[in-house]
Amino acid sequence: MVNLLVVRHAESVWNLDGRWQGHANPPLSVAGATQARAAAADLDDVECVVSSDLDRARETAEIIAESLGTGPVTSDPGWRERSVGLWQGLTTEQIERDFPGDLAAGNYPPGWESDASLIKRVFDAAHRIAARVPSGDVLVVSHAGVIYTLERHFGVAFKRIGNLGGRRILVQSGEVRLQERIALTGSGACLRPTATPERR
């Protein structure tokens, strides 16, 4: 049985701008790097650290791993944010202007990754960790859209999540189960609206 602590990356420069990030690669903000260092104080007995392959998650994971002295970070594209297609790089205001009514109606643009695709790759990534680390706690630095989609898959109502907030995921006997929400140090201070409010 392995417990995955799946958390959203620390604040990026595009979070500051309110831009939809998707597969784009903006770096952490200065405040984000500080948040990541503070987050390590909340973590005990972490077996290893895994991250999305996108820079904002990888940088967060590397800062935390260095603070914990927990070996090299394993990068896995299975944990990357969903593709948001034509909306990548836009603010919500720009989306409302250029695609009026589509966001509220859930009419997503070409290139938008489906929930089914995202869930499959995230479950596959979770099983890869379980095969390598059969027990203990593993920190996974991922993205808000991944966590929201996992919660929706398990029937949990949408609620915003701040940087370095997340969910415990239990992987046992081939099954993936959603556990409670978690919030690492500093996450409550960065609950500005995420750039990807998935309204369904």
Image (cartoon, rainbow, N blue to C red):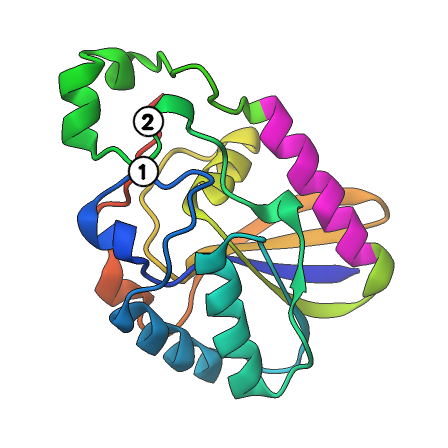
Counting the numbered discs, the total is 2
Decide whether residue 120 is among the magenta residues: yes
Q: Which mark is residue 12?
A: none
Compared across the picture, whether 34 is left or right of 23 comes to left
Is disc 1 surrounded by few (<14), some (14 to 19) or many (20+) residues within 10 Å?
A: many
Identify the residue shown where x is 17% and y is 27%: 94
Counting from the top left corner in percent of width and height, residue 76 is at 67, 53
Counting from the top left corner in percent of width and height, residue 45 is at 65, 82
Residue 114 versus residue 154 in the image, above or below: above
Residue 126 versus residue 105 in the image, above or below: below
- Name the quadrant of the N terminus: bottom right
Q: Earlier in the sequence, mark 2 or mark 1?
A: 1
Identify the residue shown where x is 27% and y is 13%: 102
Q: Amino acid at mark 2?
A: Trp
> Foreground residue, 77 or 134?
77
Q: Which mark is residue 87?
A: 2
C-alpha span from label 2 to label 1: 7 Å
**Residue 8 seen anywhere in this rendered image of the structure:** no
- Name the quadrant of the C terminus: top left
Decide whether residue 119 is among the magenta residues: yes
Q: Amino acid at mark 1?
A: Trp
> Foreground residue, 93 or 86?
86
Q: Are marks 2 and 1 in contact (CB under 8 Å)?
A: yes
Magenta extent: 116-130
Residue 4 versus residue 154 in the image, above or below: below
Residue 140 versus residue 68 in the image, above or below: above
Residue 119 position by quadrant: top right
Identify the residue shown where x is 86% and y is 48%: 173
Identify the residue shown where x is 53% and y is 63%: 58
**Residue 59 seen anywhere in this rendered image of the structure:** yes
Q: Which residue is mark 1?
A: 20
Instruction: Identify the element where label 1 is drawn.
Output: loop
